[in-house]
Image (tube, rainbow, N blue to C red):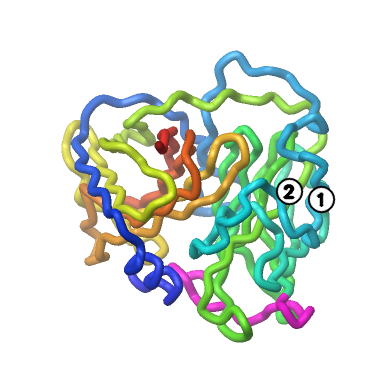
């Protein structure tokens, strides 16, 4: 990230226990890339591969847990006490007086849809002033409870503070929808927030098991490799390396003011973590090694989605890593 908000810089500087992970490019395991989402020029979508999928009714998805997806709920996960982190775990629709208010709790299956929502401020009014973070005023994410169907979008906002995210076709099941933003004015000025809520897509959900932890993943001929161990509950640096045809990649182009964007979701409760890029951007020749600052709120398996750009094309790959 070329210009981090003040809150993120403060956390990165104050956090102790830096862990350096040294990477080499070796081996690969294929992760299919589902690209060319309708109406999403330049975006790629990566879903986890399915093995022996199980048919379950969408309404029985365990992530619903009685949550109707309305923005007025203060807590959506049993992660109390994590609010001291810059972004928390992202499992609440409200924090410090800010609230994610969704226009609907249901989305159509199998077709693109516009998801409308508003960020309400401590004064009870819609927030309309947002700081720019990685070239955007708000980052929006969607993922199903089995951690498939990842989408990273940049919605548009009208003058009254209503945002619309153009979601690509969703499969049946329960989806968690996240808004990441930094208010430019008001009580939360300069503070990073990640708020989320859920929505149901009707139909029979084909739940896909989480792929086992692996240090490598491939997409569009590129191999992403990580070595080392992730640690939860502490700040540390995390490095990834990219190669193609056995050779280091050195032609990465800036994407959102960085050479890559890395988002992680915790298996089971979908806790959110954004791994902030540290590698300085210098033209269209990034790589092969990229460093990220990370703070994973809890141990367990995490599904990581790495996005990077070469020759004007955005690539998205996914891999599962375990944090101790």
* For residue 229, side relative to residue 73 (left or right): left
For the residues marked 1 and 2, what is the alpha-carbon distance in whole angstroms?
7 Å
Image quadrant where residue 52 sits: top right
Left or right: 30, with 126 as reference point? left
Q: Nearer the viewer, residue 239 or 202?
A: 239
- Residue sitting at x 43%, y 68%: 134
Residue under pointer 1: 105
**Is 255 within the magenta?**
no
Of residues 180 and 74, the one drawn nearer to the viewer in this rendering: 74
Say if residue 314 shows up in the picture: no
Task: Please tell me whether mark 1 sits on a helix, a strand or a loop.
Answer: loop
- Which of the 4 image quadrants contains residue 65? top right
The residue lying furthest to the top in this view is 52
Query: Quick one: label 1, few (<14), some, or many (20+) residues within 10 Å?
Result: some
Give the percent coordinates (x, y) of residue 292. 33, 54
Check the image and name the residue furthest to the front: 81
Question: Secondary structure under badge 2?
Answer: strand
* 7 or 200, nearer to the observer: 7
Residue that label 2 marks: 198
Mark 2 and mark 1 in contact (Cβ < 8 Å)? yes
């Amino acid at each position: 990230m070329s210009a981090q908000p003040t809150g993120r810089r403060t956390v990165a500087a104050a956090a102790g226990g830096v862990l350096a992970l040294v990477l080499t490019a070796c081996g690969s395991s294929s992760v299919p890339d589902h690209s060319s989402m309708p109406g999403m020029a330049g975006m790629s979508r990566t879903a986890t591969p399915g093995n022996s999928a199980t048919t379950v009714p969408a309404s029985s998805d365990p992530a619903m847990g009685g949550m109707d997806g309305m923005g007025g709920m203060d807590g959506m996960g049993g992660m109390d006490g994590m609010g001291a982190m810059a972004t928390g775990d992202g499992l609440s629709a409200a924090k410090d007086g800010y609230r994610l208010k969704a226009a609907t709790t249901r989305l159509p299956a199998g077709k693109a849809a516009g998801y409308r929502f508003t960020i309400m401020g401590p004064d009870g009014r819609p927030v309309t002033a947002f700081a720019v973070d990685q070239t955007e005023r708000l980052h929006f994410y969607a993922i199903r409870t089995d951690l498939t169907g990842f989408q990273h979008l940049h919605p548009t906002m009208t003058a009254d503070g209503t945002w619309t995210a153009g979601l690509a076709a969703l499969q049946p099941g329960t989806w968690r929808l996240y808004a990441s933003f930094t208010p430019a004015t008001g009580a939360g000025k300069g503070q990073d927030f990640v708020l989320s809520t859920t929505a149901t897509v009707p139909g029979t959900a084909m739940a896909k098991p989480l792929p086992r932890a692996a240090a490598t993943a491939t997409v569009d001929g590129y191999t992403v490799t990580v070595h080392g161990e992730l640690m939860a509950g502490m700040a540390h640096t995390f490095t990834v390396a990219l190669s193609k045809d056995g050779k280091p990649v050195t032609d990465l182009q800036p994407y959102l003011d960085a050479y890559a964007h890395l988002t992680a979701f915790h298996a089971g409760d979908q806790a959110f973590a954004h791994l902030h890029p540290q590698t300085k951007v210098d033209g269209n020749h990034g790589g092969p090694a990229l460093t990220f600052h990370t703070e994973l709120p809890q141990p367990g398996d995490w599904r990581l989605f790495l996005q990077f750009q070469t020759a004007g094309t955005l690539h998205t790959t996914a891999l599962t890593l375990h944090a101790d």
